[in-house]
Amino acid sequence: MQQTQPQKNRVLNILKSKVSLAPMAGITDYVLRSMIRQYCKNCLITTEMISSEFLAQNRNQTDILMLDNTHHPIAYQICGHKPYMMKDAAKRLSEVADIIDINMGCPVRKVVCGHDGSALMREPELAYDIVQAVKEGTDLPVSVKFRLGYTAAEMNYVEYGQKMQEAGAEFITLHARTRAQMYSGKADWTKIKDLKNNVDIPVFANGDVDSVESAIECIKQSGADGIAIGRGVLGDPSLLYRIDHYFNTGEILPAPTIFEKLNIMKQHLQQEIDLRGENVGVKFFRKFYPFYISSVPNASKYRGVLIKEDNYKKLQEYFSYIEKDIAN
């Protein structure tokens, strides 16, 4: 089923940039989305994966739906394997989203064992029904994120993408690994071109883009319409902006210095504390330290200290020690 021109136009009206923030559970929260938007004004940002069953059972839960008016354009990503629940989730999220994104690529065991995420790549008919159900629940564009296949022997990404388009998906993001690979090995960007050549809807490439240079190479190999960046933004929320800037101007801006990354880290931590309170915010932030201080001398020593410290004032002292180490 070819996509009509009006459908293409409404997707392209939202996708004003060739870069997007890929969803990451426990990572792309309200704070990180806000930081990405401070740097990159037009990129598409995507929420954490939201379980349709969780949403149904927590009707009054609002934290995961938090939105700032500056976040648009934004996609809210949902996961699940029950079409009627996915329809209801899409209907509810349509109040805040610009795009409803369906997760069919998460490789995590507990998600796959729940029949969600990458598990759906083994059930294309059910996946088709889910997309149609979501379309019934929203008037917004619907996108799908998936992988090359469940295993290397089950690479069905081209046929799967065609089926998602036939069901009504208007935008695809392809992570160029199989479910079996998880996040190991190297993403095969060349395979994305196979999908791009066989569908009529925009295709964004995903996997292993962590610099402007890798983004250039990814587009070259994949022929994709754009790039969805996930883990590459960890420790560097400005990455999407620099890639977007290159696509618009051809200029490669320098990556943040160590001192700049430390300042960004402190801002990030403070915003998590402002949102969650000191105790929860400090603990939530522990996962980010390894990425922000990776290039710091004695990084492993500091990392071991930072991830165990609960006192915010003590953390500030450690930050001062790190800055002195760098200066010396």
Image (tube, rainbow, N blue to C red):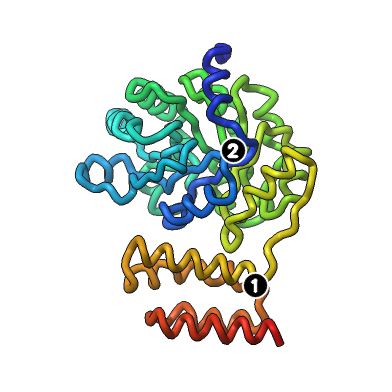
Residue 132 appears left or right of 195:
left
Quadrant that contains the N terminus: top right
Q: Is residue 322 above or below residue 79?
A: below
For the residue pair 274 and 74, the one nearer the viewer reads as 274
Task: Give the secondary structure at mark 2.
Answer: strand
Expressed as whole percent of the image width and height from the top left, the position of residue 14 reads 53, 29
Disc sitting over residue 174 in the figure? 2
Tag 1: amino acid? Phe
Residue for badge 1:
259
Q: Residue at x 27, y 47 (%)?
A: 62
Residue 181 appears left or right of 65:
right
Residue 243 appears left or right of 145:
right
In the rendered image, is residue 59 in sight?
yes
Task: Give the secondary structure at mark 1.
Answer: helix
Expressed as whole percent of the image width and height from the top left, the position of residue 83 reads 32, 29
- Looking at the rendering, which quadrant does residue 17 occupy? top right
In the rendered image, is residue 152 in sight?
no
Find the distance from the CA under tag 2 to the CA under tag 1.
Answer: 34 Å
Q: Is residue 104 above or below residue 11?
A: below
Mark before the other along the chain sequence, 2 or 1: 2
CA neighbours of label 1 inside 10 A, class few (<14), some (14 to 19), many (20+): some
Q: Residue at x 44, y 56 (%)?
A: 31
Q: Is residue 81 above or below residue 290?
A: above
- Looking at the rendering, which quadrant does residue 189 occupy? top right
Q: Are marks 2 and 1 in contact (CB under 8 Å)?
A: no
Foreground mark, 2 or 1, reads 1
Disc sitting over residue 132 in the figure? none
Q: Residue at x 69, y 46 (%)?
A: 243
Tag 2: amino acid? Leu
Q: Residue at x 40, y 67 (%)?
A: 284
Expressed as whole percent of the image width and height from the top left, the position of residue 266 reads 51, 70
Quadrant that contains the C terminus: bottom right
